[in-house]
Image (tube, grey):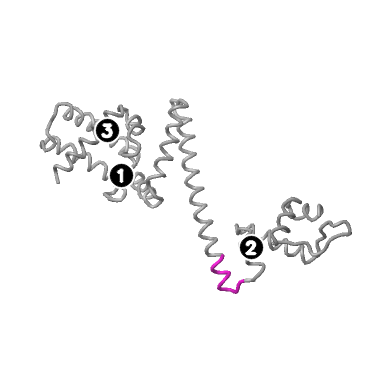
């Protein structure tokens, strides 16, 4: 068995497991009870390895070997496997993008503290929790179309609008005041550049805010109380506008 394991690239433990689950039972035993594999067993082992390289699970391989599919069955099996591999490739590509972004942050002019770096990781995880892959792709597409200069300009304008709206809120300006309505309208226009006006994306962003107000407020440079009060004020203005 040791020679077979070495030749196949598998461990003896793996061969024992294949035998136990009926995937590759030894056709014979020695007088001492040790497994002995025949030439047919070796061919079956190479088939198992070939199917594993395609990414099939042991259960799928067992089904294939016990009942060889016809052409339609192979097509169905391989199509499903291709879809799974494509999804994994997409996930890997996204992870590569994330890691490159983190490396760029570490290589920037100001090395982030451990706290800020972990905060970035937290934000990435939060983003993936509330937006599905299609929404994340659309958001990434809008950001790519805008370009970094426009994104930075929008970020600066968002902060300025937040300051102005905060002053109006603290001063008790009514939510139907024309100046306040104009500020919120501009806020909405800026947000639409990133969301494309997609209501599902906007709803997801709203849920993310509602569930993570303190963390998102801190990232924006506000206290939790300030962030909650500002967003509540903006929502009230929108409600008053109909």
Kindly check if marks 2 and 1 are in contact, taking CB atoms under 8 A apart as contact.
no
Query: In the image, which residues are magenta?
Result: 69-77
Mark number displayed over residue 233: none
Locate residue 165, reporting x and y percent.
19, 31
**Image position of 227 (left or right of 51):** left
Report the residue marked by disc 2. 61
The residue positioned 73% from the left and 64% from the top of the image is: 44
Kindly check if marks 3 and 2 are in contact, taking CB atoms under 8 A apart as contact.
no
**Disc 1 packing (10 Å; few <14; some 14–19; many ≥20):** many
Where does the N terminus fall, quadrant-wise?
bottom right
Kindly check if marks 1 and 3 are in contact, taking CB atoms under 8 A apart as contact.
no
Locate residue 242, reporting x and y percent.
14, 46
**Disc 3 packing (10 Å; few <14; some 14–19; many ≥20):** some
Report the residue marked by disc 1. 194
Q: Sequence order check: which comes first, mark 1 or mark 3?
A: 1
**Magenta stretch containing residue 138, yes or no?**
no
Pick the front one: 28 or 192? 28
Using the rendered view, name the quadrant where residue 24 is placed: bottom right
Using the rendered view, name the quadrant where residue 219 is placed: top left
**Image position of 192 (left or right of 23):** left
Identify whether 28 is placed above or below 199.
below
Could you tell me how far apart the alpha carbons at marks 1 and 3 are, in whole angstroms? 22 Å
Element under label 3? helix
Locate residue 207, reporting x and y percent.
32, 43
Q: Mark 1 against mark 3, which lies toward the viewer?
A: 3
Report the residue marked by disc 3. 228
Residue farthest to the right, as pictured: 31
Could you tell me how far apart the alpha carbons at marks 3 and 2 are, in whole angstroms? 54 Å
């Amino acid at each position: 068995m040791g020679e077979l394991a070495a030749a196949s690239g598998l461990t003896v433990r793996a061969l024992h497991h294949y035998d136990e689950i009926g995937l590759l039972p030894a056709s014979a035993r020695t007088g001492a009870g040790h497994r002995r594999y025949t030439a047919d067993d070796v061919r079956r082992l190479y088939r198992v390895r070939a199917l594993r390289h395609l990414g099939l699970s042991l259960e799928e391989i067992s089904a294939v070997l016990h009942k060889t599919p016809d052409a339609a069955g192979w097509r169905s099996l391989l199509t499903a496997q291709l879809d799974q591999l494509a999804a994994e490739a997409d996930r890997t590509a996204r992870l590569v993008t994330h890691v490159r972004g983190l490396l760029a942050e570490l290589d920037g002019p100001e090395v982030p503290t451990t706290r800020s770096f972990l905060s970035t990781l937290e934000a990435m995880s939060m983003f993936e929790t509330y937006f599905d892959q299609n929404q994340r792709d659309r958001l990434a597409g809008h950001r790519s179309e805008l370009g970094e200069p426009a994104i930075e300009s929008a970020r600066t304008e968002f902060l300025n609008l937040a300051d102005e709206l905060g002053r109006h809120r603290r001063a008790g300006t009514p939510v139907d005041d024309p100046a306040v309505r104009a500020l919120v309208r501009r806020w909405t226009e800026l947000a639409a550049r990133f969301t494309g006006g997609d209501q599902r994306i906007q709803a997801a962003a709203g849920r993310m805010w509602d569930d993570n107000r303190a963390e998102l407020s801190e990232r924006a440079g506000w206290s939790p109380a300030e962030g909650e009060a500002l967003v509540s004020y903006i929502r009230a203005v929108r409600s008053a506008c109909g």
